[in-house]
Image: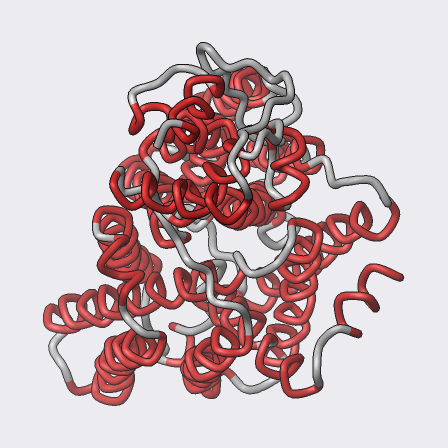
């Protein structure tokens, strides 16, 4: 518990309240994406209508993540106030459309409800994805252990809030979901203002290596997300009371999140993200194996297992992305936009595939068993691929012509700084590249620079490679000679 108290102790009471905004967002997410809790306020919406609503939300989310990844430099320049205003305005329009549908659905022709509900879903998806990216930007201001603790604790608080909502009459579900979202929007702006500004910069070698390093965890999470969307459609064909589904989802989620909390509490050494990540694989496999056996006998347990697999994978991927952005100085909007676009597309694809084929997948059907076996096979292959590099600790890059022996320039410190600044300006170095360039010119080795800047050695190597490319050199000896002759 020392780590938890250490995280909380360094925060002011006002900050604790503001930072809880992410838990409010997660509660909203549970109500909308993990069950039909929010739509239950409208009454009379069948499973097909709920499916099309989820598809609409998915389309909106994918669109925002793709645009954020492509135009991250523009997004990063926008102030927090502007971003929060846009997010709030879009989401409020979505809530208004859905609220009007709930209010007037008894008086509207059946064919007119679905298009408007999908419009509300798209608007809600746009606002939700944008808010996700804002909390992602906030997460990059923490260290790896701190962000892991923060995300897991936020999930615990969100489950408690979700539990309280299940105790209330169904009519308050939609207002509660809207209130959670609006509170989260209000808190994220204040939370970002309370933390150090994350100055993102894009260096092509660093970005290239970061994407290659993210390939394995993203692929593993994509498979789990696809199965999560597929499972929701398959199990949704059987009528499970909403109360039973909520109770099962709450219980299983609470157990798994508490288990996720243990490594950060018990392990004093640096967290091994790869080992924690492996929990997602058997969870999702268990969901698919249980489906042919229990179907709906225990209130949606099979579906809950599949959802948990994606949830655990998503939590770990979130921490990997936040730590990588902080380490490399790459814009969080860029990294999270790319990764979340992939995972959300997988959920959307799984939902569509499950919806198209749901009628052919019935209890006792041979096809259902084949689906379970294929799912386990895919998970097994994903495990082999994902943990080929077991560390998942960072990026490994060898720089051709690099020699780690200690050297130094003969310039006085002031003169060296002026020369390095002139070279950096002329070659358009990023701020991080200029910082590392000066240290290289002073003769510091990669490990020492890593310790001085509190970043991984692989990140320093990636920036060094970018510096060498811009200067047209291949080794540090050439860099030092260049500075001496400037």
> Whole-percent x and y of residue 373?
53, 19
In this image, 259 relative to 444: left or right?
right
> Whole-percent x and y of residue 165?
58, 80
In this image, 90 relative to 54: left or right?
left
Answer above or below: position of 168 versus 311: below
> Whole-percent x and y of residue 194?
54, 78
Front position in the image: 51 or 342: 342
In this image, 135 relative to 392: left or right?
left
Q: Is residue 44 visible?
A: yes
Front position in the image: 161 or 384: 384
- Which residue is drawn at the image coordinates 27% and 64% (left, top)? 77
- Which residue is drawn at the image coordinates 42% and 86% (left, top)? 175
| Res 451 → quadrant | top right
> Whole-percent x and y of residue 159?
64, 68
Answer above or below: position of 325 versus 8: above
- Which residue is drawn at the image coordinates 66% and 30% (left, top)? 447
Front position in the image: 199 or 349: 199
Image quadrant occupied by the N terminus: bottom right
| Res 365 → quadrant | top left
- Which residue is drawn at the image coordinates 63% and 77% (left, top)? 161
In this image, 19 relative to 185: left or right?
right
Image quadrant occupied by the C terminus: top left
Q: Is residue 302 visible?
A: no
Q: Which residue appears farthest toward the top when viewing the image?
A: 401
| Res 465 → quadrant | top left
């Amino acid at each position: 518990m020392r780590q938890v108290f250490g995280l909380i102790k360094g925060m002011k009471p006002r900050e604790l309240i503001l930072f809880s905004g992410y838990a409010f967002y997660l509660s909203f997410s549970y109500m909308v994406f993990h069950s039909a809790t929010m739509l239950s306020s409208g009454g009379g919406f069948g499973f097909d209508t709920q499916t099309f609503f989820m598809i609409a939300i998915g389309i909106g989310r994918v669109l925002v993540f793709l645009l954020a990844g492509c135009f991250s430099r523009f997004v990063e320049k926008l102030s927090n106030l502007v971003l929060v205003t846009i997010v709030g305005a879009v989401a409020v329009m979505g809530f208004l459309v859905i609220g009007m549908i709930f209010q007037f659905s008894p008086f509207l022709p059946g064919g007119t409800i679905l298009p408007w509900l999908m419009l509300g879903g798209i608007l809600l998806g746009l606002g939700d994805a944008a808010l996700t990216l804002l909390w992602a930007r906030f997460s990059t201001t923490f260290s790896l252990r701190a962000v892991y603790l923060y995300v897991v604790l936020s999930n615990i608080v969100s489950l408690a809030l979700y539990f309280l909502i299940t105790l209330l009459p169904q009519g308050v579900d939609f207002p509660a979901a809207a209130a959670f979202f609006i509170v989260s929007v209000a808190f994220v702006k204040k939370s970002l203002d309370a933390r150090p500004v994350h100055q993102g910069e894009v260096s092509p070698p660093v970005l290239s290596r970061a994407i290659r390093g993210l390939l394995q965890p993203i692929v593993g999470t994509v498979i789990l997300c696809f199965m999560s969307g597929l499972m929701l459609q398959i199990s949704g064909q059987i009528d499970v009371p909403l109360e039973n589904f909520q109770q099962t989802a709450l219980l299983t989620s609470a157990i798994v999140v508490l288990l996720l909390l243990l490594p950060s509490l018990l392990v004093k050494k640096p967290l091994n993200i790869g080992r924690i990540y492996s929990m997602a694989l058997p969870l999702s496999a268990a969901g698919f194996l249980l489906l042919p056996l229990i179907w709906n006998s225990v209130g949606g347990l099979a579906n809950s297992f599949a959802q948990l697999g994606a949830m655990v994978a998503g939590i770990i991927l979130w921490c990997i992305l936040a730590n990588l952005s902080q380490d490399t100085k790459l814009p969080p909007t860029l990294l999270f936009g790319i990764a979340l676009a992939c995972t959300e597309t997988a959920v959307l694809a799984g939902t569509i595939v499950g919806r198209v084929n749901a009628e052919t997948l019935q209890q006792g059907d041979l096809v259902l068993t084949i689906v379970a076996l294929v799912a386990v096979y895919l998970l097994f292959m994903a495990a082999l691929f994902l943990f080929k590099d077991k560390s998942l600790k960072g990026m490994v890059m060898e720089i051709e012509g690099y020699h780690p022996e200690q050297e130094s320039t003969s310039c006085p410190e002031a003169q060296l700084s002026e020369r390095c600044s002139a070279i950096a300006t002329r070659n358009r170095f990023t701020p991080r590249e200029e910082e590392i360039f000066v240290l290289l010119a002073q003769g510091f080795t990669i490990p020492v620079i890593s310790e001085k800047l509190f970043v991984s050695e692989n990140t320093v190597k990636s920036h060094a490679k970018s510096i060498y490319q811009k200067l047209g050199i291949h080794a540090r000896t050439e860099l030092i000679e260049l500075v001496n002759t400037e």
